[in-house]
Amino acid sequence: MIRLTLSRTGVFLLTLWAVLTLNFLIPRLMPGDPALFLLGDAAETAPPAMLETLRARYGLDAPAWEQYTAYMSGLLRGDLGYSLARRQEVGAVLADKLPWTLLLGGVSFTAAAVLGVALGALSAWRGGRLEIVGVGVSVAVNAMPAFWVGMLLLATFAARPGGLPAFGAYTPWAGYDSAAAEALDVARHLILPATTLALALVGDIALLTHAAVRETMGETYVMAARGKGLRERDLLRRHVLRNAMLPLAARLGVVAGLMAGGSTLVETVFSYPGVGLTMYQAVIARDFPLLQGGFLVVALAVLAANAAAGLLYGRLDPRAKGGAA
């Protein structure tokens, strides 16, 4: 048991180091000079000395290995760096944006997981026309690009007087009479982006659930339980779904982790002020520190979600419990 724990810890640390290293390299492999962006319109007429001074101020002229050392040592101190474009600490920027991404991702993931599992399980369990319709709907929804769904929802529900909000997470400069009014405003702004993101996930979850339930239904213990006269509802809940959730748990863990950064496209379409939109703006601005901070948030979210999925798998699988004992 100790050897297994040490092995998993070593793999985790090695994976984390690889992710952090890629996090450092990827922004620097992008074309463009952050110093030119910082100068804006004055970049064309700026003297070379000004560019060199600007690069030196932000450490952009240092050798790559020095930048890497400073980057890793900063992470050990909890220092994510200073945003070149926003003139603000990266940690402060992400702390302001992360709650919005968690709200959007949490609502979208919960809705997609509940609807996807229900659609996949019922279509496989009932069979017949319901299965044909359920699988067909799942495939169609899974094939729709998220940006196209977002634009369609905007054209349908936002492009008319009194429609749903088309951008942002709240109404700027709104005077709220109560906390309930503020929550209602935030909820109205959340409807379209959360629906778009949920639709991007629900088809994949439904198809995976359908396949898992179909496979589990053919197991001997399911047939034996049915032969003993167990009610269909109890059979589905206690035997089929519990075991069908084993492969689904790992997939849901990956999806949940990617929600922190995978919502970039949706946040961009709806100008939702989360980590995804911030990372997109950092790419445009060649803001290396902010982009690295955003990637770090996504990496940690994926690792944490995979760890949670492993724990869930252990609780669902009796064999894993026996091995742990």
Image (cartoon, grey):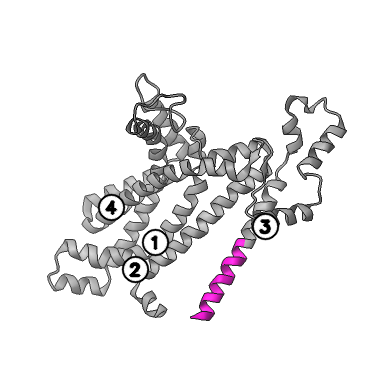
Point out the tag, 2 or 4, that comes first from the N-terminus: 4
Residue 71 at x, y percent in the picture: 70, 53
Q: Sort mark 1 into few (<14), some (14-19) or many (20+) by Cα contacts within 10 Å.
A: some
Classify mark 1: helix, strand or loop: helix
Q: Hey, what amino acid is under mark 2? A: Leu
Whichever of labels 3 and 4 marks the residue nearer the N terminus, that label is 3
**Residue at the (61%, 48%) spot, across then down:** 293
As measured in the structure, the alpha-carbon distance from the residue carrying label 2 to the one carrying label 4 is: 18 Å
Question: How far apart, in angstroms, are the residues tagged by discs 1 and 2?
Answer: 9 Å
Q: Earlier in the sequence, mark 1 or mark 2?
A: 1
Eye-nearest disc, 3 or 4: 3
Q: CA distance from mark 3 to mark 1?
A: 29 Å
Badge 4, how many Cα within 10 Å: few under 14, some, many 20+? some
Say whether marks 3 and 4 touch (CB < 8 Å).
no
Q: Is residue 163 above or below residue 107?
A: above
Mark sitting earlier along the chain (3/2): 3
Q: Which mark is residue 316?
A: 2
Q: Which quadrant of the structure image shows residue 32?
A: top right
* Marks 1 and 4, how far apart at CA: 15 Å
**In the rendered image, which residue does mark 4 sit on?**
118
Q: What secondary structure predominates along the stretch shown in magenta? A: helix
2 or 4: mark nearer the eye:
2
Q: Which residues are magenta?
A: 1-16
Q: Dot 1 corresponds to which residue?
A: 249
**Are circles 3 and 2 on residues that touch, CB within 8 Å?**
no
Is 163 rendered above or below residue 12?
A: above
Which mark lies nearer to you, 3 or 1? 3
3 or 1: tag closer to the N-terminus = 3
Task: Tell me whether circle 1 and circle 2 mark residues in contact (CB < 8 Å).
Answer: yes
Name the secondary structure under disc 3.
Answer: helix
Question: Mark 1: which amino acid?
Answer: Ala
Q: CA distance from mark 3 to mark 4?
A: 40 Å
